[in-house]
Amino acid sequence: MRKIAKPLVLPDTAAYWQAADSGRLLVKRCTRCGEHHHYPRDICPFCLSEHTEWCEAAGTATVYSYSTMGQGEAAYTLAYVTLDEGPTMLTNLVDGSHWCIGQRVRVVFAPSDGGPAVPMFTAI
Amino acid sequence: MTLNGSAAIAGVYEHPTRKADQLSVLRLHADVACGALADAGLSKDDIDGYFCAGDAPGLGTATVAEYLGLRLRHVDSTECGGSAPILHVAHAAAAIAAGRCNVALITLAGRPRAAMAEAQARAQAAAAGAGGKPARPALALKAPDPDAPELAFELPYGPATQNLYAMVARRHMHEFGTTSEQLAWIKVAASHHAQHNPNAMLRQLVTVDDVLASPMVSDPLHKLDCCVMSDGGGALIVTRPEIAKSLGRPLVMVRGTGEALKHAMGGHIDLSYSAAAWSGPRAFAEAGITPAQIQYASLYDSFTITVLMQLEDLGFCAKGEGGRFVADGNLISGVGRLPFNTDGGGLCNNHPANRGGVTKVIEAVRQLRGQAHPAVQVKDCRWALASGIGGALASRHTAATLILERL
């Protein structure tokens, strides 16, 4: 199995990783322009407002693209999935081997190597 | 201010090595600098501007300038990955137009292949000492920057260059019906050109079937969809047109320049286009010509999909038509409509320091001067384009487009 690199937790993303570690996926939303964004930051990348808030995501998404690299047990699937809230995030597709673009997936959480759990996605 | 006509490329040099066992990174930078100066017919003391990117060690511009004993009044270390030297040509032209320098040197060099072999040898020696099995050394990449906030949301998922580009290929196939066979034609064309280049790493002619039969690296990209890993480098001399004219060599003028940066846009990911869709039109507008007038194109070829994306984004064909455009040898010099990468490109010839930008400009200049290999030389080549994508197509990258004319 591939070791999941421990994510570096910074002050403006601590809440995201704390939630992930307890099995919840958060997404940032700007209360000024209303846009969701990912990766999360304090300042909205669309309007530069500081008025951003954490929302709990539904945890469901659609596969945008993916690629499986490596052979046998070392194989893993990198993917972009589009959250129902709007943003597309980089992730892994896990517990399956036949994926397709447009497929519906849901979030699961995988332990990282000495850090918080990391959101990944699996078939619904 | 337009950069059209503000500068000329007076000297180019590509290092012949592809594995620099006994050469340091700085020695490679120095070798290519000397080569380009000799090609231009200029001397070290003529250089008053110097440009390099992240492949230069130490303090970059200062480290290389000290090694070479340069006296400079303009420096630029804009780092944008492999497209940097193409962008540096535009920055040099702007500096020349602004009176900041007269003769600009641009270098790119590195030895990732030799460094990898050295790391492997060290790991084997350590394992022999410990009586265990040798560990496989990691790719010689810089340690992740702890201040880059996006990395926490990427590194846990194992992004490698290959799978990031593979996701772009997969999406292109989904949206436009592009096939692996069509992508393979890009490699086939590159191999047709590389067979004539004695310095190319891969000189063997390959077929579409060879590409499809090569191991799958990251689905849907096969091994032969990927560029080589090589050592070496290249250098360019950019100067005032009146200085270039005095050197008695074919005059290669800077006509159009464009740069653009695309990133993950807060999660608004769209892999159907690259930043070349923005840099290309700027360059064509400045040059005052259309893609149909380009007779030779150097297109960044980290992977076959990278070439396909630039062909569409630069306007050589409509969006989604890239697969049909590259099929049946349309990129092969003397055969197809748009000869590309006649040195064999990154796919077959050289991708020094894991950066393909400088070789793109060098081969474009060779074509314009009529100095490409006779088997791949475009007849009476007046207009050429060099395009680079630095970074990763699927996440963040900087595109640079350069249009050159031979007078």
Image (cartoon, coloured by chain):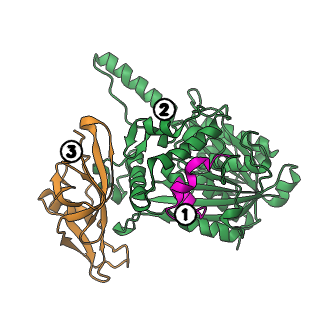
Chain colours: A orange, B green
Range shown magenta: B308-333
Mark pair 3, 1: CA separation: 40 Å
> Residue at the location (59% across, 38% down)?
B191
Mark pair 2, 3: CA separation: 28 Å
Q: Quadrant of the N terminus of chain A?
A: top left
Which residue does the numbered mark 3 point to in the structure image? A113
x and y percentages locating residue A56 in the rendered image: 17, 70
Q: What residue type is labelled 1?
A: Asp
x and y percentages locating residue B228 in the rendered image: 52, 38
Q: Quadrant of the C terminus of chain A?
A: bottom left
Q: Which amino acid does label 3 sit on?
A: Asp
Which residue does the numbered mark 2 point to in the structure image? B115
**First-in-chain label (2 vs 1):** 2
State yes or no: discs 2 and 3 in contact (Cβ < 8 Å).
Answer: no
Do marks 2 and 3 both belong to one polypeptide chain?
A: no
Label 1, residues with CA under 10 Å away: few <14, some 14-19, many ≥20: many
Is B292 above or below relative to B160? below
> Residue at the location (67% across, 31% down)?
B198
Q: Position of B165 compared to A105: left or right?
A: right
